[in-house]
Amino acid sequence: MPAIREGARGAVISGWGTSLPEKVLTNDELAATMDTSDEWIRSRTGIAERRVGGTTIGLSIESGRQALEMAGLDPSRIDALVLATTTPDKQWGSAAVVQHELGMRCGAVDVNAACTGFMYGLVTAHGLIAMGADRVLVIGTDSLSRITDYTDRATAPLFGDGSGAVVLESVDGDGELLGWDLDADGSALGILQAEVGGYIEMEGKEVFRRAVRLMVDSAEKSMAHAGVTIDDIKLIIPHQANIRIIQAACDRLGIPIERASVVIEHTGNTSSATIPLALADALDRGRVEYGDLLLLVGFGGGMTAASCVLRWGGDAQ
């Protein structure tokens, strides 16, 4: 992907929000209905529980409202809404319904890039701001429980529902985005897919192999565009698919997993929501300071890959 052009209008994240369903589905509950156990799931995925329930629209409204409130913005001031989801409630129009319910009067679009959807949406939002928009709301939401086969122990323990949102606001001068990368390899669709009206299908070993490679390759491209190295990165915000994938990607990049934001233990894989959920967790815990460099990176069905480097707060010196 091309480097950011000199003089491009920048943006910063001014607010964020999250939403998780109330219902918690534990490993022990899954073990009561299939041949698995809490120890088996934890050791292979790092997941202890996941949230299930709610709707993509409902979860998006809640996370979006929180992000707007944190940013101190009236919804009417938002110029565009980008909703990343692979599980829309309707064939079309989920973003438009969220826009309406939040009281916004702007363009609204659904983006489907599987688990990299939020990253695709974030880069798209920066492009809108570079072209003149002042404020964009980006939401990543998935309700994967609706397309999960709870008789399949290879996939059922992995997935959950959730939503995360950020508000991007334009700034004078350079913004937070220093480098980005979007990629796809359609030849690998068959190893992680879901037919329309069907359940998630996955070849676990092959997904693991390709996922680590795709994440590392995309991350290295973004860092090269940003002119930084892994030693400059304060915190990595990876897609929360599997703790082993996160660990392997960190190892290959040369960054200790202690410098990663990991929330998978209590959320599972929430697809488009994982990166904004992990980002919000790091911010809420005070793990990010002004001027810190963050590496956001993920992979998804399709297969897709995406990453970016952010300097938190913009052009800190």
Image (cartoon, grey):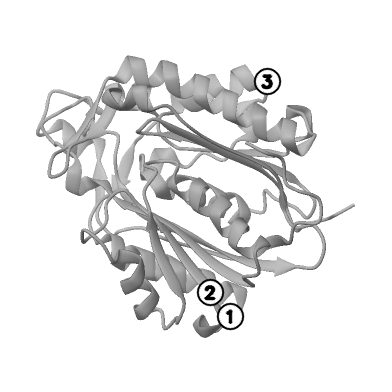
Q: Do labels 1 and 2 touch, CB within 8 Å?
A: yes
204 or 43, which is in the foreground? 204
Residue found at x 72% / y 40%: 3
Q: In the image, residue 243 lies at what x, y percent?
A: 45, 28
Kindly indicate the quadrant of the structure image that contains residue 45.
Answer: top left
Tell me the amino acid under the disc marked 1.
Answer: Leu
Q: Which mark is residue 73?
A: 1
Specify whether 176 is left or right of 266. Answer: right
Numbered badge on residue 68: 2
93 to the left or right of 246: left
Report how far apart the C-alphas of labels 3 and 1 lie in the structure.
39 Å
Residue type indicated by callout 3: Gly
Q: Residue at x 61, y 17 (%)?
A: 252
Mark 3 vs 1, N-terminal side: 1
Circle 3 residue = 254
Q: Is residue 106 above or below residue 154?
A: below
Disc 2 and disc 3: Cα gap in Å?
Answer: 36 Å
Tag 2: amino acid: Leu
